[in-house]
Image (tube, helix red, strand yellow):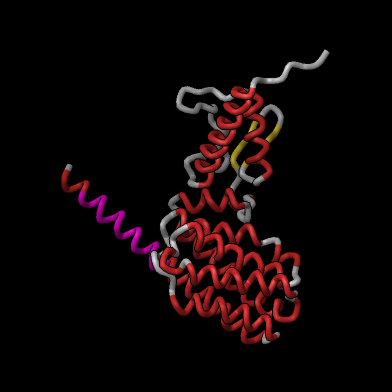
Amino acid sequence: MESASKPDDETATEGTLHDRLLDRWGAAIVDGTIAPGDRLPAPDLDSQRPSRTVTREVTRVLESMGLVTVKRKVGATVNPCRLWNIYDPQVIEWRLRGPDRGRALHELSELRACVEPMAAQLAAGHADQDQWARLTRAAIDMVANADRADGPDYLRADETFHRTLLEASGNAMFSALGDVIASVLSGRTRHELMPRKADEKALRLHGDVAALIRRGDAEGARHAMEWIVDESDRAVEQMTRKDSEDSARAADKESSES
């Protein structure tokens, strides 16, 4: 006898509950609402109660991210942040949504500063024709969307450029950081930390990096990439500071009116 399968609407509902529970627990762990050593709370989603299967699956995902440790007769307890997989794109997103956003962005910028200039230098000796063409096309698309640098088309081109750069380095470990770098770029856009208009020098240097890699100029590509990463960090710091100042002014206004 064939086992009965769940109706499509029930499966979709459980999938939605899975994503919501994962997001609620994960974000609460990362922002400190659920502290290290605490057990995961009851899985309550605005009066909706996820099934045990959903709860177990979400717990396994959190365990795979290093956010919790599961032991028999104890359940799932939250790990200290030193055990988290902070390169996981979802963990990065939770950090960017929390009170630790500024620090997370700066740490990610420091990672980029260590990796991407070296990737550009290596790419000058390893990039093939297809990779050079993708870098060039991405740089052109960024210029085409420069007046909408906070939009999806610019983001898509920016992500393509940086993913391709890491791949073109010929270093598999650099290439594996593609999702991490993409998380930084998409997080800046999602959290409104991108200017409306792209920096003109940064745009030109993206094109220069592609051309320098094509010519095999390793030092030139490295220096241009260093400037791009530094400019990105400065821009994010400026936008983050402005965001904090705006929030503080709004809080002061609300307090004075109450």
Q: Is residue 235 magenta?
A: no
Left/right placement of residue 166 relative to residue 31 reads right
> Which residue reaches farthest top?
1
Q: Provide residue 188's location: percent of width, then percent of height.
A: 47, 59
The residue depicted at 59 percent of the width and 40 percent of the height is: 78
Q: Quadrant of the C terminus?
A: top left
Circle count:
0
Q: Nearer the viewer, residue 56 or 207?
A: 207
Q: Is residue 251 magenta?
A: yes
Give the main secondary structure, helix, strand or loop, of the magenta stretch: helix
Q: Quadrant of the N terminus?
A: top right
The residue depicted at 55 percent of the width and 34 percent of the height is: 21
> Which residue reaches farthest left?
257
Image height of 30 relative to 127, above or below: above
Q: Provide residue 96's location: percent of width, then percent of height.
A: 49, 53
The residue depicted at 63 percent of the width and 57 percent of the height is: 179
Q: Provide residue 100's location: percent of width, then percent of height.
A: 46, 54
Q: Nearer the viewer, residue 44 or 215?
A: 215
The residue depicted at 30 percent of the width and 60 percent of the height is: 245
Q: Provide residue 33's location: percent of width, then percent of height.
A: 47, 41
Left/right placement of residue 126 relative to residue 206 reads right
Residue range in magenta is 237-253
